[in-house]
Amino acid sequence: MMKKTINTKEDIKVLVDTFYGKVQEDAVLKDVFNAVIQDQWPKHMARMYTFWQTILLGDRSYYGNPFMPHAELPVEKAHFEQWLALFFETLDENFTGEKAEEAKWRAGKMAEMFQYKIAHYRQNNSKPLI
């Protein structure tokens, strides 16, 4: 398959569908994701389309706090590392260019921030306010 740049909603759909297809099969991630999402994968995927469209295409279709659904997940550093590895692999297999590199950078920053915030809430035995 020829790699392409990320320019359209269809490109975002390919990225999200391919990535989460891998997540659902991954030994490290599938149990965590499937336990939380259960039979709501179509709803989750639709939300991920709007999230990445907003971030990479600037179409402002995502509203909400991306951290909150993740605040109390039973995840550790290894989960974030595997999530990033699969995300980067999906990008490298399918896409090239500036938006693909931006997606990697943003995913890395999100993983870093989510890990920090989850650790903070655990260490302080507190619940996130926002």
Image (tube, rainbow, N blue to C red):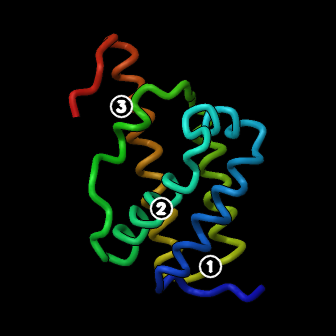
For label 2, the SS is helix
- Mark 1 to mark 3 CA distance (whole Å): 30 Å
The quarter of the picture where the C terminus appears is: top left
- Answer with left or right where residue 72 lies relative to residue 130: right
Q: Badge 2, how many Cα within 10 Å: few under 14, some, many 20+?
A: some
Q: Is residue 5 above or below residue 31?
A: below
Q: Residue furthest front?
A: 39
Amino acid type, residue under disc 1 in the picture: Phe
For label 3, the SS is helix
Q: Nearer the viewer, mark 1 or mark 2?
A: 2
Amino acid type, residue under disc 3 in the picture: Lys
- Mark 2 to mark 3 CA distance (whole Å): 25 Å
Residue 10 on image: x %, y %: 54, 81
Please tell me in which quadrant of the rendered image residue 121 appears.
top left
| Residue at 64% in and 60% down | 19
The quarter of the picture where the N terminus appears is: bottom right
Residue 75 on image: x %, y %: 56, 29
- Disc nearer the start of the sequence (1/2): 2
| Residue at 29% in and 46% down | 65
For label 1, the SS is loop
Residue beneath disc 3? 117
Q: Badge 1, how many Cα within 10 Å: few under 14, some, many 20+?
A: many
Residue 128 on image: x %, y %: 27, 26
Residue 45 on image: x %, y %: 53, 58
Amino acid type, residue under disc 2 in the picture: Ala
- Mark 1 to mark 2 CA distance (whole Å): 21 Å
Give the label on residue 95, or none: 1
Residue beneath disc 2? 46
| Residue at 36% in and 41% down | 67
- Disc nearer the start of the sequence (2/3): 2
